[in-house]
Image: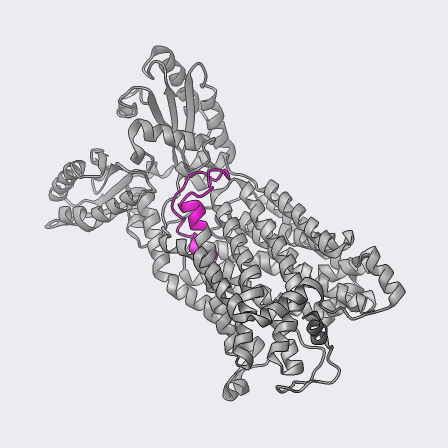
Amino acid sequence: MAALARWCITHRLAAVLLWIGALLGTGTAAMLAGSAYSNDYSVPGTESGRAAELLESGFPQLGGDSDTIVWHTDEGTVDAADVQQTMTKTLDEVAALPGISTVVSPYHKAGAGQISQDRHTAYAVVTFDKAANDIDRGEAQALVDTAKDAAGDGLQVELGGSAIGLTEAKTGHTAEAVGVLVAAVVLFLAFGSLAASLIPIATALVSVGTAYAGTVLLAHTMTVADFAPMLGTLIGLGVGIDYALFIVTRHRRGLKRGLPVAEAAREAVATTGRAVVFAGATVCIALAGMLILRLNFLNGVAISASLTVVLTVAASVTLLPALLSYIGMRALSRRERAKLAADGPTPELPTGLAARWSAFVERRPKLLGALALLVITVLALPTFSLRLGTSDQGNNPRSSTTRQAYDLLAEGFGPGVNGPLTVAAEVNGAEDRLALDKLAERLAATDGIASVTPVTYDESGRVAHLTVVPESSPQSEATSRLVDTLRGELLPAAEKGTSLETYVGGITAGYDDFAAIIVGKLPLFVGVVVGLGCVLLLLAFRSIGIPLKAAAMNIAAVAGAFGVVVAIFQWGWGADAMGLGTAGPIEPFLPVIMVSVLFGLSMDYQVFLVSRMYEEWLETGDNRRAVRVGLAETSRVINSAAVIMISVFLAFVLSGDRVIAMFGIALAAAVALDAFVLRTLLVPALMHMLGGANWWLPKWLDRILPRISIEPPECRGVAVPGQRVPGAVDAGAELAGER
C-alpha cells in the first residue's frame, strides 16, 4: 500500500489523468451502447416459469407486453357518441404507432367485457411487438402522448402497464445532487477546509461515475435490473465519501504531527487505506453471496454493485492521495495552519464529547448495553410481520397515470383485473379437452374468482390457456391463497385420470414462486455471508469473540432496518406523505440484496472501530484502555461518516422509485443504528464487560491461522496484559483526565 501511495503521489498528474480517462472512456462507450436492462424475475423450473414457456411456444403473439388505456367519464357513459368517436379515433392512431402489435377496443366484439357495468369506465388492451424489457422508452412515451391527447371535456384518460411504467421512471439525479450537497456541508463542518471537504466528494463522483457507465455496459452481457445503476450509485456515494473521509482524517492527523504533505498522504494510505481495502472487501464478499442463489436477476445486481465498491476503493487509495498532494497544507483549515505554524507539531489527543462519552460507557456498560438492546428490539419487532409479495402499480404515487389507471380499473371491474392469473395446459387428446372445459366451469364457480375466460387452444391443439380474474388485487394475500388453492386442489383434481398437465402463471404466481425460491435459500445465503465475514475478522483480529459479536451486531442492524422498512412500506406509516405510494408487500428480492449490502456496510464501522482498539491492545495489553481509547479516537469520525452516509441514502427517497426508496431508507436506518447504537454504545459496553476474553484465541488456532494486519500499529511490540510498551502515545492519560 505504501508503494502504491508513493507512486500516485510522485506521479499525481498521471494518476488523475488515468481516472479521468477511465471515466470519459466508459461514459462514452455506455452512451454509444445504450441501456439494456432487464427485470427478469422468472425462475426456470418453477410452475409459473413452465406456464410462461408453454404460452410462448403455443401463443408467440402473447409474448409482447400488454398495456391498457383506460378512460372514464362521470357525466354520461363511455357509450356516448362523442366519447366513442373520440376514443375510436385515438385507438386507430395508437395502432399506427411504431412498436404496437395489436389494439383491442371495447367497441369491437373482441373487446367484449371491457366496459364496466355502470358504463362509466372502459379500457383497451394495447400489445407491443416486444417484451417490456425490450421496448424503447420513446415508443412507450409516444403511446402515452397519443392517448392523453384525447382527454378533456369531462373525459379522463389514463394508462397502465409495464411499458407505461418506463415513462415514469426517475433518473435519480435530484437525489444524487441533494445527497452530495449534504455530504459536502457535513465534511466542511468536520474539516473547516473547503479543499479537504471537496476531495472526498470528487473521489466518490469519479469512481461512481465510472462504475455507473460500467454497469450500463455490463447489462449488454448479462441480466441487470433497471434499478441496479441507481442502487450502485447509492452504495458508491455512501461508501466512497466515507472511505475518503477516513483517509483524509488520517492525513490531516499526520499534517498536525508535522509530517510533510507527501509523507502524511503516504502514511494515511498505508495505514487507514488498508482498513478501507479490508472494509471494501467485506462489502464485496457480502454482495457476492447473492451469487450462490443462482438467480440471473440477482447475479447482475451483485456484480454491478461489487464493481462500484471495487472502483470506489481503488479511487480511495490511488486518486485520493494524488489529489491530497495537490491541495497540500490546505487540507487543514486556516486556523489549524496558523496554530501549527505558531505552536509546532502536537499530538492529536481525543478530548471533548468523544472522550467524555467513552469514559461514560466505561463506567455504565451494563445500563447502556441494556438500553441499546431495548432500542434494537423495539425497532426489529415489525420484521416478524414481513410479507413478501407483488408491489404493483397500485402502490405508485397517486398523481401517476399508472396509479390512476389501476384505480379506475379496480373501481370499474374489480381489483383482480389488474393482475389476472393464467392457467396454461398441455393437452393430449379429447379426454384432456373435456377435463379442461370442466375445469373452466368449476373455476368460474369457485369463491375468490371473479371471472374465467373460455379455453383458447393453439393451432396444433396441444397447448391451451384460460385467464382467471381474482376478486382480490395482485398484491393481496387472498390472491396468493387462491394460487395455492389452484395448485394444491383444483388443478390436481382436474388432471386426475387424464394426461392433462396444467400450470398457474401470472404476476402474483410468478412473484410467489420467486419469493419461495429466495426464502428457501435464505438460510444458506445468510450463513455463507456471516461465515465469510467472521473468517475475515478472525484473521484480522485473531480473536473468537470479535467475529461473533460482529455477526450478532450485523444481524441486529439488519433486523432493525427491516423493521423500519416494514413499518413504512408494508404498514404504510408515512409512505404516502413521502410520495412513496400506499402500503403494500415487500419485494421478494429486497431481503437478499439488503442483507448483502447491510452486512457489508455494517462491517465497515466494526473494522474502523475495533482496528483502533486492537492496535491499543497490542501496545498495552489493557482491555479497558483499548476499548476506551479506541472508542474515543474513532467515534467522532464514525459519527461524521454515518451522518454523511445517512444523508446520501435518505436523499434517494427523492428518486420517486419505490424500490430505490426502500433501499435508501433501509440503508439509512441500518447505518444510524450501527453507528449511534451498536458501534458507539453496545459494542464497547459488551467489550468492557467481557474484558480480556474479547481477544481470546486458542493457541493451536493461533499457530495455524495466516497472519494479516488491517492497520498495523506504529509500535511493533506486542504487549502482555498489564505491561506498557515503551514509547506508546499516552492517549489514555488524557482520557482519564476527562473523567
Q: Position of residue 651 (x, y in %)?
A: 58, 45
**Left or right relative to 110: residue 522:** right
Q: Position of residue 349 (x, y in %)?
A: 74, 69
**Left or right relative to 622: residue 250:** right
Q: Position of residue 21 (x, y in %)?
A: 70, 52
- How many numbered marks does the figure carry? 0
Residue 621 or 204: which is nearer the viewer? 621
Residue drawn at x 12%, y 50% as measured from the top left:
496
Displayed quadrant of residue 284:
bottom right
Residue drawn at x 42%, y 26% as measured from the top left:
158
Magenta span dominant secondary structure: loop
Q: Residue furthest top?
A: 81
> Is residue 569 part of the magenta span, yes or no?
yes
Q: Is residue 722 depicted above or below 241 in this figure?
A: below
Q: Quadrant of the C terminus?
A: bottom right
Is residue 430 among the parts visible in the rendering?
A: yes
Is residue 592 among the parts visible in the rendering?
A: no
> Is residue 201 part of the magenta span, yes or no?
no
Q: Is residue 606 depicted above or below 507 in this figure?
A: below
**Left or right relative to 522: residue 348:** right
Q: Position of residue 176 (x, y in %)?
A: 61, 45
Residue drawn at x 60%, y 49% as measured from the top left:
648
**Stretch of the chain drawn in magenta:** 565-594
Residue drawn at x 34%, y 57% as measured from the top left:
517
Q: Is residue 715 depicted above or below 516 in this figure?
A: below
Residue 427 or 469: which is nearer the viewer? 469
